[in-house]
């Protein structure tokens, strides 16, 4: 079954990628806890914040020193499978996979301050500051927009060369694009926020292979955080490192 999944992904990629990927350069690395099943990633000031998911072990929101990669503090979310993570300018928001709740935390203490219900699955989450809205994925080809009360206010379908791209997972708003990775893919897509069209993509298969030769074992690329307007921090599920990656400008 794992071989079949990998073959399907390769065939899918061959059909949609008619343009060349953006070039990138790895500027450095930081240590990453290889026990962390990374779901969401973001940077606030001098800290990295990571959301993890797990069955049995518990899910976490973790504050990490951006210079050293060392954990500063973390909070455990029992009874849920933690997913995407976003910062609205004052609070952290963590999705849950199938529990239909978003958890709101103080960014300073990581203390939970609220639980917000929503319908359906939660996968990736990011915040668009200029519009003061969230963008959320649910494992389909859709990105759903939500207001600050987490009410649904719109959606787009992600597509490339007129083909829908499903399994949209981790999200990050960067410049004027929504960055997204696809579950079981080595690719980060740069998506037009209005149309849903993929305008550029980044192929990080070489980075993933250095961590994990087999894409079919679940320890895949997942985790995108903006450092500045040229540079991203990326990692994956149970990877040993964060990678600082400079992207050629769009």
Image (cartoon, helix red, strand yellow):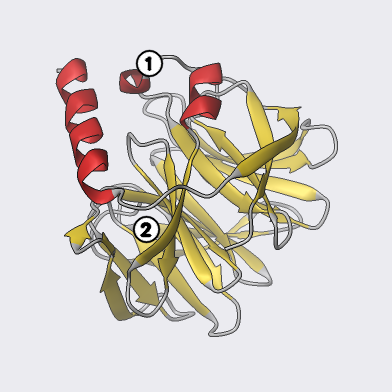
On screen, residue 107 above or below 170? below
Horizontal and vertical percent for residue 244?
Answer: 70, 40
Nearer-the-camera pick, 47 or 242: 242
Q: Place residue 154 in its image quadrant.
A: bottom left
Q: Which residue is at a point 39% across and 76% down the rendered structure image?
A: 146
**Is 179 displayed left or right of 250 in the figure?**
left
Quadrant that contains the N terminus: top left
The residue that label 2 is drawn on is: 101
Q: Place residue 128 in its image quadrant.
A: bottom right
Horizontal and vertical percent for residue 106?
Answer: 67, 60
On screen, residue 193 above or below 25? below
User: Number of numbered discs present?
Assistant: 2
Q: Which residue is at a point 58% across and 45% down the rendered structure image?
A: 23
Packing grade of label 2 (10 A; few <14, some 14-19, many >=20) is many
Can residue 4 be spotted in the picture?
yes
Nearer-the-camera pick, 137 or 74: 137
> Which label was assigned to residue 248?
none
Do the numbered discs 2 and 1 sit on residues whose CB atoms are within 8 Å? Answer: no
On screen, residue 187 above or below 192? above
**Is 235 displayed left or right of 17 in the figure?**
right
Quadrant that contains the C terminus: bottom right
**Is 175 displayed left or right of 123 in the figure?**
right
Q: How far separated are the C-alphas under marks 2 and 1?
A: 33 Å
The residue that label 1 is drawn on is: 214
Q: Place residue 197 in its image quadrant.
A: bottom left
Can residue 41 be spotted in the picture?
no
Q: Which residue is at a point 42% across and 30% down the rendered structure image?
A: 54
Nearer-the-camera pick, 249 or 230: 249
Foreground label between 2 and 1 = 1
Horizontal and vertical percent for residue 59?
Answer: 49, 36
Q: Which residue is at a point 19% across and 64% down the rendered structure image?
A: 162
Horizontal and vertical percent for residue 166?
Answer: 23, 52
């Amino acid at each position: 079954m794992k071989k079949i999944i990998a073959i399907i992904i390769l065939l899918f990629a061959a059909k949609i990628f008619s343009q060349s990927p953006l070039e990138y350069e790895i500027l450095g690395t930081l240590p990453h806890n290889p026990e962390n099943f990374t779901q969401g990633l973001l940077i606030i000031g001098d800290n990295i914040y990571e959301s993890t998911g797990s069955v049995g072990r518990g899910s976490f929101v973790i504050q990490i020193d951006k210079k050293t990669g060392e954990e500063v503090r973390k909070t455990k979310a029992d009874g849920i499978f933690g997913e995407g993570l976003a910062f609205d300018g004052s609070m952290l928001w963590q999705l849950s996979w199938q529990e239909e709740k978003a958890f709101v935390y103080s960014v300073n203490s990581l203390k939970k301050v609220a639980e917000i219900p929503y319908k359906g699955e939660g996968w990736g989450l990011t915040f668009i500051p200029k519009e003061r809205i969230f963008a959320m994925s649910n494992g389909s080809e859709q990105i759903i927009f939500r207001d600050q009360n987490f009410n649904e206010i719109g959606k787009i379908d992600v597509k490339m060369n007129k083909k829908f791209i499903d399994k949209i997972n981790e999200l990050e708003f960067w410049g004027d694009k929504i960055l997204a990775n696809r579950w079981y893919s080595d690719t980060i897509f740069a998506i037009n926020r209005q149309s849903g069209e993929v305008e550029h993509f980044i192929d990080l298969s070489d980075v993933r292979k250095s961590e994990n030769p087999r894409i079919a074992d679940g320890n895949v690329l997942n985790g995108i955080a903006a450092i500045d307007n040229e540079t991203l921090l990326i990692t994956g599920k149970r990877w040993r490192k964060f990678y600082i990656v400079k992207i050629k400008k769009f």
